[in-house]
Image (tube, helix red, strand yellow):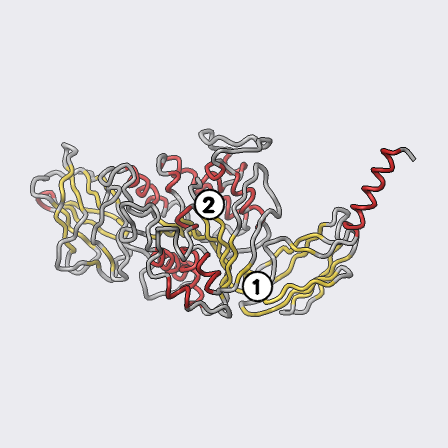
Amino acid sequence: MDKKIFIIVLAFLVVIPGVLNAKVKLASIYGDNMVLQQQSEVTLFGTGTPNKQITCIATWDNKKLTSRINVNGKWKIHITTPKAGGAYEIKFNDGTPHTVTNVLIGEVWICSGQSNMEMPVKGFRGQPVIGNTNYIVSSDPKRQLRMFTVKRDWSTTPRTDSITGVWGEPSSEVVANFSATGFFFGDLLQRSLNIPVGLIHSSWSASKIEAWMSREALQGFPEVELPDVNKKEFGWAAGTSTLLFNAMINPLKGFPIAGVIWYQGEANSSNPELYRKLFPAMVKQWRTFFKNENMPLYYVQIAPWKSKGVDETDWSDFRQVQLELMKSLPHLGMVTTGDAGDSIFIHPPYKIKVGERLAYWALSDTYGRKGFQCCGPIIKDYKLLEKGAVELTFDYGSDGLNPENAPVLGFEISGGDGVFKEAKAEIINGSSHVKVWHEDVITPVEVRYCYRNYKIGNLFNNAHIPASPFKLQINQ
């Protein structure tokens, strides 16, 4: 036999038996301790022995499902989940049995964004999460809360199973290392709903929104450069369009979720008008991807921070866009953070507030809970009063605003000269209305609230959630 042919045949004989006798393996998002979305169709897929039949039995209904493993060793099975409950098992067999254990059925949420979502419960080095220790030491591994952290990865083309990670029960170690914003959201959500909750954390520090979008979704934005699919290295992968979606979201295709919480924007703050266009496009794309046109997405307004200077307005301009985006699509909700920033650290330590406020949105908008305000006061309308005073009306203040019977701090007002003066402000008769004025401004042109990179006001509602910063043009 020719030597080259012999080598090829030998290689074939070595490799093929491993393929022909491959054990059943599921895509990495499926595994022990996972949570599947209740009352949904889940696409289970993986690899096994080519040309064999694979069976699947879930113990919640004991129905036997079958599929044929193709010549490439790949298989796919669609399974329907029941109402929340568990724990269950899912048993697979292609001649060799494989069982996924301790499976819960409940509500699954994705936690995504950049470093303020990535910041763990234990904090970054030298940057704490205030109030975290009690949550860590009291963690109960048997609680119906499960967490999966997606390892950082990127790709120029969509992948189907590139995700690296495991589902963890809430031990002290798992909680300490999980996303703080994600954990505090899930903690309150699970305690409130009293059903299983699964959290999939997929974020990357300093990532831009376009990195979390698909090539197709970005085709209509000529100002966004699309990467060369053949390129092997990128100096800033997290800032390069499509790369993170391809590797860290696309492999979740066929894995139903209840919704998304999103803490991102700092990396896009230099171009708020582009973000105004990209954000709703991303939401629409993710809703299509997860096959849920009404999928909720609740996001965090970037917190007070000095950026180019405490009295500059580059971050304020971005926060204004985030505020206006609340009304761009249904089932969007924004967490206000006027009391949760830090002038020095871009990673503020008040993640408990942020995570719980995200949960307020979910509990109100997604799960229909009533009797509480889920959001801080949001500017709604205005009317002119005598002597240049302006009466402002706020949403999410139906139970009244505060501080009542005390000066409201953080307002500025300008006239035709464009010079902003620190305004006087007071709440009108225990209502959701605020009177703003300055004796030297008779014809007001613009009213602002905390419209500086780092400016702290004191306007809250009765849920003690702060008002969103804003700027408002006054038409005479």
Cβ atoms at labels 2 and 1 below 8 Å apart? no
Which residue in the structure is indicated by mark 2?
Answer: 204
Residue 43 drawn above or below residue 411: below
Quadrant hosting residue 63: bottom right
Q: Residues within 10 Å of mark 2 (few under 14, many from 20)?
A: many
Instruction: Give the Cα separation between the discs numbered 2 and 1.
Output: 24 Å
| Foreground residue among 241 and 180 | 180
Q: Position of residue 307 (x, y in %)?
A: 30, 39
Q: What residue lies at 31% left-to-right and 46% top-to-bottom?
A: 345
Q: What residue lies at 92% left-to-right and 35% top-to-bottom?
A: 1
Name the disc covering residue 285, or none: none
Q: Secondary structure at mark 1?
A: loop
Q: Residues within 10 Å of mark 1 (few under 14, many from 20)?
A: many
Q: Earlier in the sequence, mark 2 or mark 1?
A: 1
Which residue in the structure is indicated by mark 1?
Answer: 33
Q: What residue lies at 75% left-to-right and 46% top-to-bottom?
A: 72
Quarter that holds the C terminus: top left
Q: Disc 2 residue type?
A: Trp
Quadrant hosting residue 190: bottom left
Q: Disc 1 residue type?
A: Asn
Q: Position of residue 233 (x, y in %)?
A: 54, 33
Q: What residue lies at 57% left-to-right and 70% top-to-bottom?
A: 86
Q: How many numbered marks are there?
A: 2
